[in-house]
Structure formats: C-alpha cells, structure tokens
C-alpha cells in the first residue's frame, strides 16, 4: 500500500504501534495504545476496528494488537521517513536532538517517497538517527542493534551509549547536559534499587542517574555485536 493511499491518522497509528512494540515485548492493548496516542480508549478502539477491517492490524477481542504484514510494511516506511527527517534536521539545519521529534511528526506526512530517498542519499544512507534509533533501509530491513537498557545493567558493565529514547525533550536535554551523548563510553559502578538510582562513570565523571534517565538510555557492551548494517 503506497504512502499516499493512507490517511495521516492511519499512518500515525501504524507508526505508533510499531514503535511501541519496538521498545518492549509487552502485549499492546487498546488501553496501552490510548496512552501512546493521547486519545480516549473508545476512540482508539474504534480506530483499531477500522484498521483491522482494512487488513492492517489483527486484534482479538480484549486481546493484544498486532500489525499484519501490510501494516508492518507501511509502519516501517513511516519510521524510515521520520528518522531520516530527524537526521536531516540535525545534520543540515542545526536542530538539537531534543527539538526534532515534533518537527519530523509534521513533515513526515508531507514529503514524497522520492524526497525520502533523496534525503537518504544526501545523508549517506545513515543507519541510525540522532537518538541512535535504527533507520530502515529502502527494502524495510533494519540494522541490527543488540543494545541493553542501562537500567538493567549490573555493576561492572562497560559500554557505549547506543540509543536514547526521544519521548521526552526535557529528558533528552537533561541527558545531554550530563555529557551522555551517542557513543559516550560509560561504566556502571553501582545500583541503589531502593533509591531508584544507578551510579555510572562517564568521561571522567561520576553520575547518579534516576530511573527515568536510566530507562531511556541503551548501551552497547563490547561483547555485544552490533551486526552489519544493510545497504540502503
């Protein structure tokens, strides 16, 4: 199904469903999707029914929501658009990594497939966006990123920052202010589970991270293979 054949609302739903499942293995329910979309459960339930009838989703009554092959193809195409636009805004227009998400949300619906491919070529077919999120290739394949969520790492873990969630701009600014950018090396020194903090060393500094920050950061440990990136 071509990009122009889908409404903006459908594109948003498919992309949000895909990205929600990218970050967790938990089943995606109507109530969970309503939180991601910011709409009432009844509105989301109705939208899910319509997308299911169109063959883009599967949804058992009171069960989890999943993308069909057609839905996933369309969702991945939207993810590619979004992440390429974010990369262009940072690399060419000087945006900060905390400023690009909402801008890309608007632009991704307006640009043509031809422009998306032109952006990819101009950017050198990048395999990750400014937040470290993998960028799908033209054929929908993803670079492999076997990263670990920092909040789940044990003391003694060493690695580099591979990915940071872009859900909250203020959190991105906070993390950047700590000097934790992509590819920054860090070591986990200790965990304080009852305090909800994690102590790490990065760039010669000792930092105490709260749970929201540690949950938002993914690291690539030396013994984890990043894999070879597909050609775009």
Image (tube, rainbow, N blue to C red):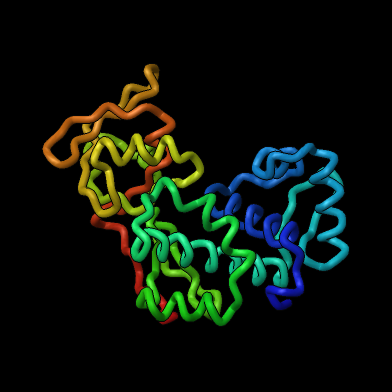
**Depicted 181 relative to depicted 198: above or below:** below
Where is residue 8 shown, x and y percent of the image?
72, 61
Side of 181 where 7 appears, left or right: right
Q: Can residue 146 be seen?
A: no
Where is residue 161 shown, x and y percent of the image?
30, 49
Q: Locate residue 62: give its quadrant.
A: top right
Quadrant containing the C terminus is bottom left
The residue at the point 39 percent across, 53 percent down is 131
List the single residue furthest toward the left: 204
Side of 87 where 141 appears, left or right: right
Q: Can residue 210 be seen?
A: yes
**Depicted 152 relative to depicted 139: above or below:** above
Quadrant containing the N terminus is bottom right
Side of 74 where 114 appears, left or right: left
Q: Which of 124 and 15 is in front in this view?
A: 124
List the single residue furthest toward the front: 93
The residue at the point 20 percent across, 48 percent down is 185
The residue at the point 43 percent across, 35 percent down is 170
**Depicted 193 relative to depicted 160: above or below:** above
Give the total number of marks visible in the rendering.
Answer: 0
Where is residue 79 shown, x and y percent of the image?
56, 63
Where is residue 93 shown, x and y percent of the image?
37, 61
The residue at the point 79 percent across, 59 percent down is 58
């Amino acid at each position: 199904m071509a990009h122009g054949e889908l409404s903006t609302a459908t594109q948003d739903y498919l992309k949000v469903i895909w990205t929600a499942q990218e970050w967790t293995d938990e089943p995606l329910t109507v109530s969970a999707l309503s939180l991601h979309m910011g709409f009432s459960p009844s509105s989301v339930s109705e939208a899910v029914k319509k997308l299911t009838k169109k063959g883009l989703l599967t949804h058992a009554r009171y069960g989890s929501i999943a993308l069909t092959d057609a839905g996933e193809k369309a969702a991945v195409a939207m993810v590619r658009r979004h992440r390429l636009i974010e990369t262009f805004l940072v690399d060419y227009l000087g945006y900060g990594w905390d400023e690009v998400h909402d801008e890309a949300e608007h632009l991704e619906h307006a640009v043509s497939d031809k422009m998306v491919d032109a952006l990819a070529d101009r950017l050198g077919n990048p395999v990750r966006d400014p937040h470290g999120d993998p960028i799908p290739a033209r054929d929908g394949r993803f670079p492999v990123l076997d990263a670990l969520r920092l909040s789940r790492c044990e003391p003694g873990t060493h690695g580099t920052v591979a990915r940071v969630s872009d859900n909250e701009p203020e959190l991105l600014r906070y993390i950047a202010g700590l000097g934790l950018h992509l590819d920054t090396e860090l070591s986990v020194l200790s965990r304080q589970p009852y305090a909800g903090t994690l102590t790490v060393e990065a760039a010669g500094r000792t930092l105490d991270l709260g749970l929201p920050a540690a949950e938002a950061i993914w690291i690539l440990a030396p013994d984890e293979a990043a894999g070879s990136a597909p050609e775009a």
